[in-house]
Amino acid sequence: MPQGEHIELHRKRYGRRLDHEERTRKKEARSVKKRAAMAQRALGIKGKMFAKERAKEKATMRKTIAMHEERDKKHKADDGQKGAAMPAYLLEREQVERAKVLSNTIKQKRKEKAGKWEVPLPKVRPVAEDEMFKVLRTGKRKKKEWKRMVTKVTFVPPGFTRKPPKYERFIRPTGLRMNKAHVTHPELKATFQLEIIGVKKNPNGQAYTGLGVVTKGTIIEVNVSELGLVTPGGKVVWGKYAQVTNNPENDGCINAVLLV
């Protein structure tokens, strides 16, 4: 049996160290200095390869930052007549046009890729791990503390099958599972009860997104086929993103605003 499977089995049975997340965070924080030292020490072909790889990473990072900072910028219109003189009555008038951008569909896809949306709640209160999870003591003498119960509302897909209880690390109670949301359309000023397709992004981290935890500020995908929304190309829109605006665990329902 490969060694990796033994490790996986051990993790399923006993979980990780209690300070695993903290150690990982510190290791990541130290990695910057480690990389800088490596860059100074590397000579010859190794140094060139390292520099090339780092240049690629920086280029990708710059593109991501540019996507995040993308705005509807305005600039002066290009007349096309470079040499022609402008009449005196037009000198004061500033001709403005929108910056040239890609079509709406491609632009939307790029924003999704960069993880950026124009959202109603740009900043939300971070949720602590102690608040999010409750430690469950297991084992014959209740000595083991590797299981966690999620105390917030979660979304679980329809075809979801639980792991065997013995190996289930994160327990999502059925009483806190929701699959519908009250979504308000900001332009129509109307609210609809729509089915949730999935959790796109939880502001508290990727781990909570993977677990399907729904807290205030979470971006969820909802089924808008019954609203009859159509793209410029004439296709019916099936799924659209919405941001949760309430605390579902307190209210007993999910309220959200559609991102249009």
Image: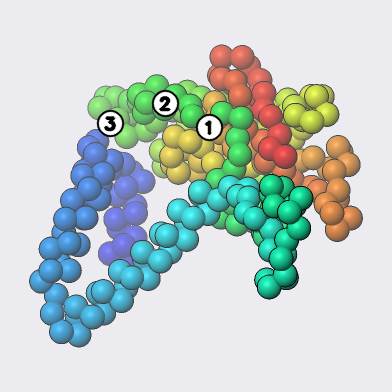
Determine the residue located farthest toward the front in the rendered image. 88
Q: Is residue 167 left or right of residue 198?
A: left
The mark found on residue 144 in the picture is 3
Residue 184 image position (x, y, % from top left): 75, 27
Quick check: can you spot residue 42?
yes
Numbered mark located on residue 93 in the image: none
Q: Nearer the viewer, mark 3 or mark 2?
A: 2
What separation in Å lies between label 3 and label 1 (alpha carbons)?
Answer: 39 Å
Question: Residue 7 vs residue 92: left or right?
Answer: left
Badge 3, how many Cα within 10 Å: few under 14, some, many 20+?
some
Characterize the local packing of mark 2: few (<14), some (14-19) or many (20 or more) Cα atoms within 10 angstroms.
Answer: few
Side (left or right) of 169 relative to 221: left
- Read off the residue under disc 1: 122
Task: Report the quarter where the C terminus lies.
Answer: top right
Task: Please tell me which residue is depicted at 16% across the width and 55% down the height of the picture.
Answer: 33
Label 1 sits on what residue type?
Pro
Mark positioned earlier in the residue sequence (2 or 1): 1
**In the depicted view, which residue is nearer to us: 76 or 167?**
76
Residue 111 drawn at (x, y percent):
59, 51
Q: Given the image, on which type of amino acid does mark 2 rest?
A: Val
Scheme of colours in the image: rainbow
Quick one: 43 or 219, which is closer to the camera? Answer: 43
Above or below for 103 versus 182: below
Q: Residue at x 12, y 69 (%)?
A: 40
Residue at the left extreme of this rendering: 41
Label disc, if present, on residue 127 of the rendered structure: 2
Residue 3 image offset from top left, x and y in percent: 28, 64
Percent x, y of residue 134: 39, 23
Can residue 200 be seen here? The reply is: no
Q: Quadrant of the N terminus?
A: bottom left
**Residue toward you, 88 or 196:** 88
